[in-house]
Amino acid sequence: MKNPLVVNALELLRRPGSLKDVVCDVEPDLVGLQDDRLAPHSNVDVELVCSSLSTGIVIEGSISARFHGECRRCLAPVDGRIDARVRELYQETVTDPDAFPIENDQIDLRPLVRETVLLELPDAPLCSADCRGLCPVCGLDRNATPCSCRTDARDPRWSALDALREQLPE
């Protein structure tokens, strides 16, 4: 089976100005993604255009995927979508420090897709920007139920440092 993310660059290199579309949905395993943050049973959507230039081939477009996790404040389930724009240069003989090599007249886009998804996945997602989180005293979800716990009390283990702070001149 032919991998849709391995592009034959020979024809593009022969004709500067030519274009090739790479549009596919790939399973995360195909690009080496075994990340728990990716939504189960969902694919990575790839929409790229390969543009041939005299200096190489520019790959640009979008990569998107669905993710799931827990809100970092209230631990509620969070589902979302990442949408990343990419633009990379590939060259037969790498002269640009930011370019990637074309090997055996092929461009392997799997590392590009993998790195893009991993960099865009949120490490600590939020269910909403104004999430109030869990009460540190009683553990109630403050988004659903307000609590009257006092949270400004200082931990007694810091009392020695608090005493030192009071002795410092301001």
Image (cartoon, helix red, strand yellow):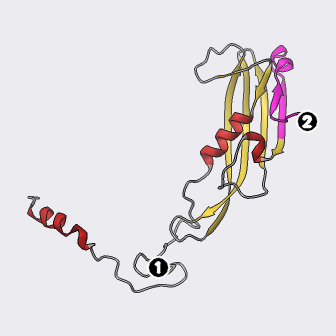
Ranked by sequence position, the earlier of labels 2 and 1 is 2
Compared across the picture, whether 73 is left or right of 51 comes to left
Q: Which mark is residue 147?
A: none
For image coordinates 62% across by 14% down, the residue present is 95
Image quadrant where one finds the N terminus: top right
| Residue 71, x across and y down, in percent | 56, 66
Instruction: Please name the amino acid that badge 2 sits on.
Output: Met
Q: Secondary structure at mark 1?
A: loop
Compared across the picture, whether 109 is left or right of 160 comes to right
Picture quarter containing residue 22? top right
Instruction: Please name the amino acid that badge 1 sits on.
Output: Gly
Picture quarter containing residue 32? top right
For image coordinates 84% across by 14% down, the residue present is 14
| Residue 25, x across and y down, in percent | 82, 46
Q: Is residue 4 in the magenta section? A: yes
For image coordinates 70% across by 15% down, the residue present is 55
Q: Which residues are magenta?
A: 1-23
| Distance from the alpha carbon under mark 2 to that under mark 1 | 52 Å
Residue found at the very far right of the displayed protein? 1
Which residue does the numbered mark 1 point to in the structure image? Answer: 139
